Image (cartoon, rainbow, N blue to C red):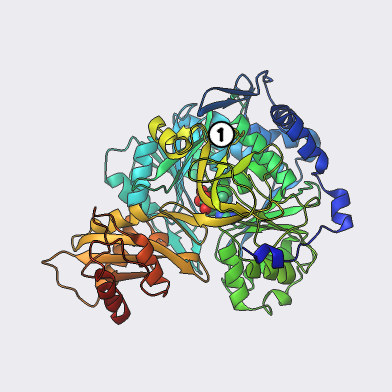
Amino acid sequence: MTESRNSNTYPPTAEFAAQANVTAADYEAAAEDRLGFWADKARSLVDWKTPFTETLDWSNPPFARWFGDGQLNVAANCLDRHVEAGNGDRVAIHFEGEPGDSRSITYAELTTEVKKAANALASLGVSQGDRVAIYMPMIPETVIAMLACARLGAAHSVVFGGFSADALHSRILDAEARVVITADGGYRRGKPSSLKPAVDAALAKGDTPVDHVVVVERTGEDVAWVEGRDKKWADVVGQQSEEHEAEAFDAENPLFVLYTSGTTGKPKGILHTSGGYLTQSTYSVFATFDLKPETDVFWCTADVGWVTGHTYIVYGPLSAGATQVIYEGTPDTPDKGRWWSIVEKYGVSILYTAPTAIRTCMKWGDDIPAQYDLSSLRLLGSVGEPINPEAWTWYRRVIGGDRCPVIDTWWQTETGAHMIAPMPGLVPTKPGSSQRALPGISVKIFDDEGQSLGNDQPGLLVIDEPWPAMLRGVYGDPERYKDTYWSRFDGIYFAGDGARFDEDGDIWFLGRVDDVMNVSGHRLSTAEIESSLVAHDAVAEAAVVGAADETSGQAVYAFVILRAEVEETDDMEEKLRAHVGSDIGPIAKPKRIHIVDELPKTRSGKIVRRLLKDLAENKGVGDSSTLADASVMDLISQQVSSS
Ligand code: PRX
């Protein structure tokens, strides 16, 4: 493991260090009294209606209660308190629509809109303890809808707009959502892209407890209408009072359920609650991004359908009082300079994006960003997958003008907020490494037996102390929560990532150690795509692997055996890809589907995916000695090279 020895580090400039929010004192305070550190952060960064007296109740692990006897309203923390502090005129959101329309919304205006939306949802019967599904494009109403739920103490379950009707249906059922908030569509790649038809199709499948669908008009396209069930956002929200008293809820009141892929076929509903999540989200915005709410303009390019959007578009930045940009569309519409024109237009100072996007921009060439004034930038963040040192250094040099720290943040849907990242202003950054746990966070690298490993030994990343933004469970399935995260090492959180400390004690991520793939920073499970393929009439067996890909980090490759009676046709691969697309969503479509006669299996019938991965990565046929029939790989290899 030599890459870190060869890599330069980039110390913060003296100027940056002098103004940084996090200093060595944070680490010292957290090391001395971890719970005291978090209690201080909860008191100083969050407004409580009822102050808490107990920081952590870990008497029934792995079920944690943080700040358990405190009460707060999360939405009021993101809105009203900034208005009350005299910052109502500060812009909360600069919205940039893909077609070029834009709107700037102040904290005072956003507060009013959320109050009206909360009144509207209450008029539809939504109250504390309910769930509301949100299936939306990237527009301000999405944020307003989420905060309106939070204001009422109801949990939202946002479903990424790229997911299919089937995926939406299963999430609505699992979360038992009573109301769906959607839009006619959004703009994508220069055209309207519909959403409401998928909601109609999902609800037509039946059995859902949904009795209201609220539809935002974004594209103005015609949509089918179910009288009595469907309501226009403009009608139902427009007529509401601008007054709404925010009730305080328990710190452990559910805030949201967000579905994520695991190692089995069925996505898990990750449950997050209020006080601890808000504390760590807010802290991390100040710590990792060094946010100065009065002067910074923050832009997180994620979609709100993922956890990054929840924590770093909605709750973290708004609770911190930030001014941020929300952009609806793709980076290459109408041209490949779109992102950089947005940075220039709004004077973005902190940019947070994913390695896939960085690698794509890198491929498009340095001359595109060079046409824009990017001098407002002062910090660059990365998230979602390991960032290769080449992309890291390009990001720093070309986008950051060699002056901005590049902060690689490691975390997960389950962790709720940043867990590992170099604190800018304190730690010299190192291309490709996420480096250190945040103050107050404790991680280790274990071997298979649960022994803590030292430097330069690859192992499994674990989190050995509870943290405020940790998931509180898998919705409706406490056993799955215990089994998935806490059983590999008793009482210790197993993240599913391989990692190692280098000789400086900095953390390098080595990818997932389970059957979870990471495509463009999005989590996909091999099992979920395999079960989708096997559900197709033509398919007898399927094996799915994530193979290294230059742009997307990993790409999905599938190997399928057709049923005996099915004849292979030229369009079979395309048909199966389309099937996965409509079953799960376009992001899950395999890059290639190879039709083969056999799959490599051990004597006990287990598919050896490692061999298929080598093949997909053009590494040839690896060691096949564990197979029941070693010649199978040669056959598959021939079929793959001729397809
Ligand atoms: O494998 C890790 C990878 O993404 C997984 C979490 O995915 P998800 O829950 O969808 O959340 C993504 C956004 C937080 C992790 O288990 N991952 C995330 N960030 C990094 C990363 N791998 C390496 N470096 C990162 N910075």
Drawn side of residue 115 relative to residue 45, left or right: left
Q: Is residue 155 visible?
A: yes
Q: Residues within 10 Å of mark 1 (few under 14, many from 20)?
A: many
Looking at the rendering, which quadrant does residue 340 occupy?
A: bottom right
What's the amino acid at mark 1?
Ala
Check the image and report above or below for 96 versus 321: below
Q: Residue at x 65, y 43 (%)?
A: 316
Q: Quadrant of the N terminus?
A: bottom right
Q: Is residue 225 visible?
A: no
Q: Residue at x 23, y 78 (%)?
A: 570
Looking at the image, which is closer to me, 316 or 227?
A: 316
**Circle 1 sits in a helix, a strand or a loop, which is it?**
helix
Q: Which residue is mark 1?
A: 150
Drawn side of residue 119 relative to residue 131, left or right: right
Q: Quadrant of the C terminus?
A: bottom left
Residue 486 spot, x, y in % from top left: 47, 35
